[in-house]
Amino acid sequence: MEKIERFWGDYFFLNKWYPIGVEVNGLKFLSSEAAYQAQRCANEEDRARFAGLDPARVRVFAD
C-alpha cells in the first residue's frame, strides 16, 4: 500500500484548502478550512467574514 505523505497532487481532494462547499449554521464556505476558522470566532459577524472567502485568503483573516 502506498503511503500518503502530503495532500497534494492526486490527493489534493483531502486537503483542507480543497475548494468544496461546506455549510454550517446557514453560512456557506468554499473550503473546510474557511468553515473551521469561522467557528473559532466569538460572534456571528466575524464568522460571516469567512463565508465565500477564497481558501487562499482564509489565513489572512484567521490570524
Image (cartoon, rainbow, N blue to C red):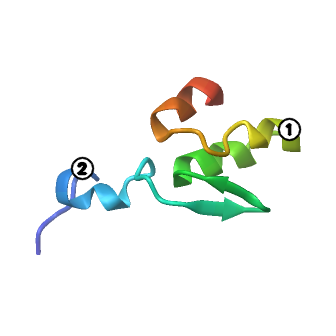
Q: Quadrant of the N terminus?
A: bottom left
| Residue named by callout 2 | 8
Side of 33 relative to 45 (left or right) = left
Q: Nearer the viewer, mark 2 or mark 1?
A: 1
Side of 30 relative to 41 (left or right) = left
Q: Residue at x 76, y 42 (%)?
A: 48
Name the residue type under label 1.
Glu
Mark 1 Cα-neighbour bin, 10 Å: few <14, some 14–19, many ≥20: few
Of pointers 2 and 1, the one earlier in the residue sequence? 2
Residue nearest the observer in this picture, 12 or 28? 28
Between marks 2 and 1, how big is the CA–CA gap?
A: 33 Å
Q: Quadrant of the C terminus?
A: top right
Q: Is residue 26 visible?
A: yes
Q: Residue at x 80, y 35 (%)?
A: 46
Q: Residue at x 66, y 63 (%)?
A: 23
Question: In the image as oriented, which residue stretches furthest toward the bottom?
Answer: 1
Element under label 1? helix
Considering only vertical position in the picture, is 55 above or below 2? above
Q: Residue at x 45, y 51 (%)?
A: 16
The x, y position of residue 7, in whole percent, is 28, 53
Name the residue type under label 2.
Trp
| Residue named by callout 1 | 45
Side of 4 relative to 31 (left or right) = left
Element under label 2? loop
